[in-house]
Image (cartoon, grey):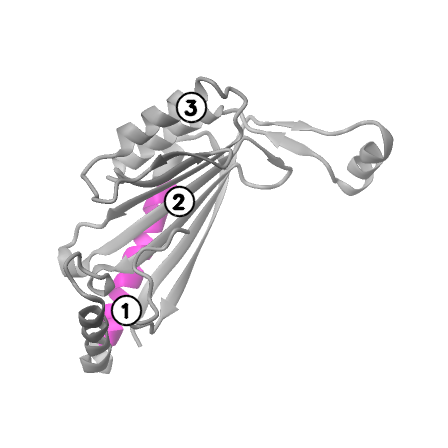
Amino acid sequence: MLLSSVTGRIDIFLKRGSAETPDRGPAGWFADNLGLFTKQTEQYSVKEFLGRYAKFLREIHHRIVFLAEIDYEEVYLGKAKKGSDELDDAVAQAYEYLASHMESNKVLFSTFGRTNRGSKDDLEITIEAQYNRKHGDGKPGIEIRVLGIPSVLVKKPQEGNDDYQARTKRLFREQSDFRKERFSKGYENTAKVLLRDYERRLYKFFDVARTTRWLHLEWGKTGEDSKPRIKL
């Protein structure tokens, strides 16, 4: 089988937040004895988070935006025909929304990019970031989800469904075991390096206390059941 996709996640626990714990009534008792009902408020406003996260996206060349939501309200939807740069427009529209919604709490920001190793050797990368300024105690303030799919397994713009399914089936069928192993190992190593690099770069833009990171590998899907662009 071939490696068909890689799913990764980076949870970011931030410094300098403040905790709010109820001190009266039943809620206060549960907070004191069971650690329940404690809320964490992060230091960054939603606007400041967006500004810092946009700098991270520019640095890793993720400038195609699928979707931006604030408190479950859609503030930007990517163009049907993908251009080279939507990031500035998406951030500007988010700022415009925040000008009249100063108490916003939750952000979801989804972008697309790719590695730069040559067309057949690239991973096509979707990144979804979620920020909660106020959240339950012990949870990360920022969650970064990453989906990487080998470019050779992604449907081409002018490729029909039947041609796409035939091409990917042929790719799975015709490769020797040795070539399949090399194919999969190469993309697996690229994904591991990429996730570590994203984690390292995020420390530049946020005041990070600690992070956790994991990677999941998906094997053996063909054109019929693989989904080239998945919103995480």
What predominant SS class does the magenta segment belong to? helix
Image: magenta residue range? 180-200
Secondary element at image label 3: helix
* Marks 2/3: CA–CA distance: 20 Å
Which residue bears the numbered disc 3? 97
Element carrying mark 1: helix
Q: Say which residue appears at 42% left-offset and 30% top-offset.
A: 206
Contact between marks 2 and 3 (CB within 8 A): the answer is: no
Residue under pointer 1: 184
Q: Amino acid at mark 3?
A: Tyr
56 sits to left or right of 177 = right
Disc with the residue nearer the chain's start (1 vs 2): 2
Spatial separation of the CA atoms under disc 1 and disc 2: 24 Å
Q: Quadrant of residue 121?
A: bottom left
Task: From the image, state whether disc 2 or disc 3 is nearer to you.
Answer: 3
Residue at 59 percent of width and 41 percent of height: 139
Q: Which mark is residue 128?
A: 2
Q: Quadrant of residue 191?
A: bottom left
Callout count:
3
Tell me how far mark 3 sits from mark 1, CA to CA. Answer: 43 Å
Q: Name the side, left or right, on which 100 lies relative to 199.
A: right
Residue at 29% from the left image edge and 45% from the top image edge: 112
Q: Is residue 189 within the magenta segment?
A: yes
Measured from the top left, where is residue 229 in percent x and y? Answer: 31, 55
Q: Nearer the viewer, mark 1 or mark 2?
A: 2
The secondary structure type at the circle numbered 2 is: strand
